Amino acid sequence: MKFITILILFTLLTIQFIKAEDGYKLWLRYNIVSDPQLLDEYNDIIKNVKIEGSSETMHIIKNVLELGLTGLLGKDNIEYDNTKKNGLLVVGSLENLSNTFLLRIKDKVINLGEEGYLIFNEKIDGNITTVITGNTDIGVLYGTFQFLKLLQTNQNIKNISIESSPKINLRVLNHWDNLDRTVERGYAGFSIWDWHKLPDYIDQRYIDYARANSSIGINGTVLTNVNANSLVLTEQYLVKVKALADIFRPYGIKVYLTARFSSPIELGGLKTADPLNEDVKLWWKNKVDEIYKLIPNFGGFLVKANSEGQPGPQNYGRSHADGANMLADALSDYNGVVMWRAFVYSNENQDDRAKQAYTEFQPLDGKFRDNVFIQVKNGAIDFQPREPFHPLFGAMPKTPLMMEFQITQEYLGQGTQLAYLSPLYKECLDSDTYAKGKGSYVSKVIDGSLDNHAKSGIAGVANIGTDRNWTGHLFGQSNWYTFGRLAWDHELSSQE
C-alpha cells in the first residue's frame, strides 16, 4: 500500500513534465538537439539574432525563430543584443541588409527571384556571422524554415552557403471541402474551415496551417470543392474568405476559390451562363471586382466544368476555351488566374474514358488566354495506383499545363493504409514525353522550361482535416510534406 501511495504521488508530481507526441506539430517539432557536441557548436554560431525589417512577415519570422531556436538549442530566450558581433544571425530581405553584406551578394540574390533565399556565413573581423536573406520577406521566411530544418537534421552550419528558388511558380493545395464541412475523399475528420464561426472566430489551426504550408513552400490554397457550391461567391461567404486570406497573406499564401459555372443563374438571376453572353461576362466581371475589393491578392478560380454532371460551356455549345477565357478576362486586370481542370468524364460519352480529355483539349492548344492553366491529373483515368502519365503532357506546347496530384489516398487505402506517395509523384515527373526529343520530361512541361512558358503550376488534392494529427493516418503527413518539397524542387529524390 505504501508503494502504491508513493507511485501515485510520483506520478502526480511528474505529470507536468510528460509531453505526449500527438502529431499536431507535423514536421515542425523543435526538440533540443540530442548530440551535446553539436549543440555546443550550434550555440557558438547562434548567440544573437538581428531581425532586419518590421513587416508582418518579419514579425512571423521572429516568432518562428524564437520557437525553433529556444527548442532546438535549449535556450530560455533569444538574445537580440546587436552590439555583440560573434555568433550573430542576421535575418532580412536584401533591401534591409547593411552595406556590409549588400555589395557582395546583391547580384546572387537578385537572380533568386521573388521567393528564393540565400543562407550563408562568413567571418567579419574574426567573428562568425550567419545571414538569411532574399529579395522579399517571403523569401526570407522560406529561408528561415530551411535554416531551422538544418538544425533539426543535425547538419553542419559552420561553412554554409545555400541558394534556393522554386522551379514552379504556383504551388497550391486543392481542398475538396464542402460548405457543410464534409470533405469529398477526406479521411481525416471534417473540413478545417469552420464557416459558421468565420469571420469573427479565428481558430489557431488556421495559423498553424499557414505556417506548415509556408515551411514547405506551398503558396496557394483552393478552399472549396471542385464540385462547387455557388454560395461561396456570395457576400456572406466572401467576408469569411477574406478573414482566411488575411491570415495567410503574410505567410506568402494566396487564396483561390472554385467557381461553379452556373453561378450567374443561381446567384445573379440570369437565364443563361453562356460564356459569350454579354450579361454573363458582366456578371463575372462585377463578381471579380467585388472579390478583389475584399481580397486584394486573391489568386483566381479553379473550375471543374462539363464533367460528372457539373455545368460548363458545353451546355451552350461552347468550348472549354470559351469558358476559361471568359473568366480569365474578368480576372486579367488583377493578375488573377484560371485553373481549368482537364478531368472531363461523362458516362453518357461513348468515347474511351482514357482519351476524353485529350480529345476535348488538345485541339484547343494555343486558344487559351495567357492567364489560363489547364490543370491535368497525373494519369488519364483517375488517380489510379498505377497508370501512365497523362497524354496531354507534351501535346499542348502553346498552353501552360498544371499538374494535379492527389495527396489524399482515394485509391491507396484511404485513411487506413500506409502509403508513401513520393515514388508515384517522381515516376510521373521523371517520365519522358519525347515531345521535343529525348529529355522532354513531364517535369519540364509543368515547370514551363520545355515550351518557354513564364507561368507554371502544380496542385495537390489535400489530405487535411480536423483530426488532431491533421491527416488521419499519421504517415499521411509525409505525403503533404513531400508534395510541398517536390513542388519547390521536382529534381529531389524520394529519399530527400
Image: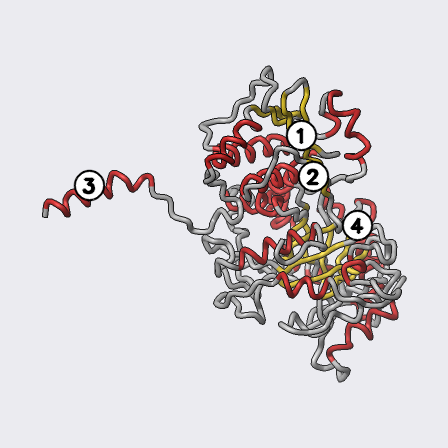
- Residue 468 % position (x, y): 45, 53
In the displayed structure, 59 sits above or below 278; it is above
Q: Residue at x 74, y 29 (%)?
A: 94
Q: Residue at x 61, y 56 (%)?
A: 495
Measured Cα–Cα span from mark 4 to mark 3: 65 Å
Secondary structure of the residue carrying tag 3 is: helix
Check disc 2 and give the amino acid type.
Ile
Check disc 4 and give the amino acid type.
Leu
Check disc 3 and give the amino acid type.
Leu
Measured Cα–Cα span from mark 2 to mark 3: 51 Å
- Residue 331 % position (x, y): 79, 50
Dividing the picture into quadrants, the one containing residue 483 is bottom right
Q: Is residue 289 visible?
A: yes
Measured Cα–Cα span from mark 2 to mark 4: 37 Å
Secondary structure of the residue carrying tag 2 is: strand
Labels 1 and 4: the sequence-earlier one? 1
Q: Can you name the residue that lies furthest to the top here?
A: 83
Left or right, residue 179 beside residue 469: right
Labels 2 and 3: the sequence-earlier one? 3
**Residue tagged by mark 4?**
331
In the displayed structure, 91 sits above or below 363; it is above
Neighbour tally class for label 2: few under 14, some 14-19, many 20 plus, Cα within 10 Å: few
Measured Cα–Cα span from mark 1 to mark 3: 50 Å
**Residue tagged by mark 1?**
121
**Residue tagged by mark 3?**
9
Left or right, residue 263 beside residue 470: right
Tell me whether the residue at label 1 lies in contact with that at label 4, contact meaning CB atoms closer than 8 angstroms: no
**Residue tagged by mark 2?**
162
